[in-house]
Amino acid sequence: MRDEDIVNICALVDFKVTRSELGAIFRKEDHPKYVECGDQFLRNFLNGLVIHMRGPMLKKEPGNNGQNKE
């Protein structure tokens, strides 16, 4: 997965991240410009990845609480 793919996946959940921010996250820990991956970035990336892989969530029909009516 390339950095542009990660930027596009984050955009699916309206989370803006730049390629330079990604570069800082993926540097070695001892590098002076290293930035730890935060919870917010990881949460938004994973939510965007779900949308990327499965597609957007379908809207539920009103009045149907997930129960089968037979």
Image: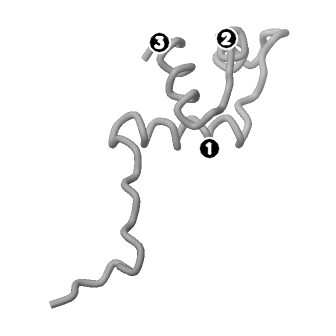
Q: Earlier in the sequence, mark 1 or mark 3?
A: 3
Task: Tell me which amino acid carries mark 2.
Answer: Gly
Question: Relative to 3, does residue 57 appear above or below in the rendering?
Answer: below
Give the left or right position of residue 24, taking residue 12 as reference.
right
Instruction: Estimate the spatial distance between the alpha carbons at disc 2 and disc 1, rounded to whole Å.
Output: 18 Å
Identify the residue at horizontal 57%, vertical 19% (top origin): 7
Q: Are marks 1 and 3 in contact (CB under 8 Å)?
A: no
Say few, some or many: other residues with alpha carbon within 10 Å of mark 2 (under 14 / 14 to 19 / 20 or more): few
SS at mark 3 in the image: loop
> In this view of the protein, which residue sits in the foreground, 41 or 55?
55
Q: Which residue is identified by label 1?
A: 43
Q: Position of residue 30 (x, y in %)?
A: 78, 14
Q: Which mark is residue 60?
A: none
Identify the residue at horizontal 67%, vertical 35% (top origin): 41
Task: Tell me which amino acid carries mark 3.
Answer: Arg
Q: Position of residue 39 (x, y in %)?
A: 71, 42
Identify the residue at horizontal 34%, vertical 37% (top origin): 53
Give the left or right position of residue 46, taking residue 19 as reference.
left
Question: Relative to 48, does residue 18 appear above or below in the rendering?
Answer: above
Instruction: Estimate the spatial distance between the alpha carbons at disc 1 and disc 3, rounded to whole Å.
Output: 19 Å
SS at mark 1 in the image: helix
Q: Which residue is identified by label 3?
A: 2
Q: Earlier in the sequence, mark 3 or mark 2?
A: 3
Say few, some or many: other residues with alpha carbon within 10 Å of mark 3 (under 14 / 14 to 19 / 20 or more): few
Residue farthest to the left? 70
Question: Relative to 13, does residue 59 appear above or below in the rendering?
Answer: below
Say few, some or many: other residues with alpha carbon within 10 Å of mark 1 (under 14 / 14 to 19 / 20 or more): few
Instruction: Estimate the spatial distance between the alpha carbons at disc 3 and disc 2, rounded to whole Å.
Output: 11 Å
Q: Are marks 3 and 2 in contact (CB under 8 Å)?
A: no
Q: Which mark is residue 23?
A: 2
Q: Position of residue 68 (x, y in %)?
A: 23, 84
Q: Position of residue 14 (x, y in %)?
A: 62, 33
